[in-house]
Amino acid sequence: MDAQKVRQTMDVQEIKHAVQIHDYIEKLEKLTKLSLKNSPIMLGLPSQKITLEIPKQSKPCYEYVEQLYEDISDHDLLFKAMKTGWQYIDSNYKKISKTKEEYFQQLNSSHGLHIAKERGYLIPDSLLRKKQFCYGQYEAYYGVHEIFYGNALGIWLSKSNFYNMHSYAKIYENVKLITSQFIVPSSVDNHSIPYMLDQLWVVSHAVNQVRLMGLEIAGEHNFFNGLQGKTFGEENYLKNLGYEMYQVASWWCRVDPYRVISEFLSVSGIFPDAINHLIGSELNSIDKYVCAICGAPMVRWGWDWIQECKIGNSTLLAHKHCANLD
Ligand SMILES: [Zn+2]
């Protein structure tokens, strides 16, 4: 590429953003002395799948269910709703409780902790004031949103299009609810600072059965406790309550949230083939997120930021911008 083209390329938003993210991760590596670029995406998996039975008979009771599908949800609410019977869980309520913008606002204002306090949990004021914003958390939610609203169908390999449309309908049917900042009482007692699961997925592969999957974005804000996530070490407690816990690396969420969610969909069994159908899933290190045309770093913040393109006989990955240059 000639010098003028390279200069133009560096002005493109997707490329500027990618350069910033890669630089940021490099700095984070130096600071933490951890090999983040080569780290796995999944940092923790549950020791087993847990299937909970739901009564077939439904009690005529909407109060818990409506609350469950709004705003910030919690363990007590969910279990009350599950006791009211299958038909309420298998409702036509929207699967994702809030928009990306609402989620951003909530994350930015520690909204979940404020709600927990209203519900009787002991939350120190210092914690309410503390800014806990984690971009990885936001980006993971953004990725989920785009995938579930069908805005990101172009992340799947074109040769598996038909199969994916079918699979997409299936996962949409099986996933009943994805909620963020889900409150679970701590193992200490009911009033101590609760756990806030970054995402809770309520999934069902069979009538009257559900799985509760907690997705936790571990990283940036956990580093200085030696890579401890908020629920690391509490898996047994959460397992006994009925939750399967999955931990993902937040730095990977910053590079490729669609990849992170696809890995989760695969390992959890929600959509086992997700990762095989994802464009770019062969890139096994953040350093490999490099454009085959201009050589600059890539990230997939927009679903179409990484594209396949034919160069000679090979299929390579490139920025949207570079793939569409003449
Ligand atoms: Zn490029």
Image: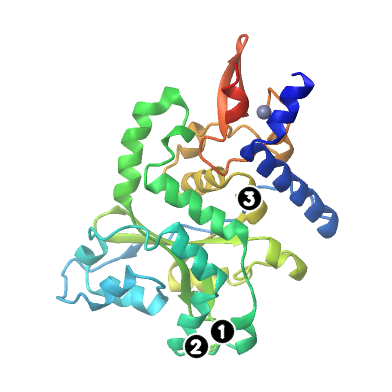
Q: Which tag is nearer the camera, tag 2 or tag 3?
A: 3
How far apart marks 2 and 1 lie (CA) works out to 6 Å
Q: Position of residue 200 (x, y in %)?
A: 44, 63
Question: Which quadrant of the figure contains the N terminus?
Answer: top right
Residue sitting at the far top: 312
Looking at marks 2 and 1 on the same chain, the residue that comes earlier in the sequence is marked by 2
Decide which of 277, 241 is in the foreground and name it.
Answer: 277
Give residue 235's mark: none
Q: Which tag is nearer the camera, tag 1 or tag 3?
A: 3
Looking at marks 2 and 3 on the same chain, the residue that comes earlier in the sequence is marked by 2
Q: Position of residue 11 (x, y in %)?
A: 68, 36
User: Residue visible at 52% across and 73% down?
Assistant: 196
Q: Position of residue 300 (x, y in %)?
A: 58, 40
- What amino acid type is highlighted by mark number 2? Tyr
Is 80 placed above or below 96 here?
Answer: below
Give residue 121's mark: 2
Decide which of 114, 54 is in the foreground and name it.
Answer: 114
Looking at marks 1 and 3 on the same chain, the residue that comes earlier in the sequence is marked by 1
Identify residue for label 3. 254
- What amino acid type is highlighted by mark number 3? Arg
Identify residue for label 1. 193
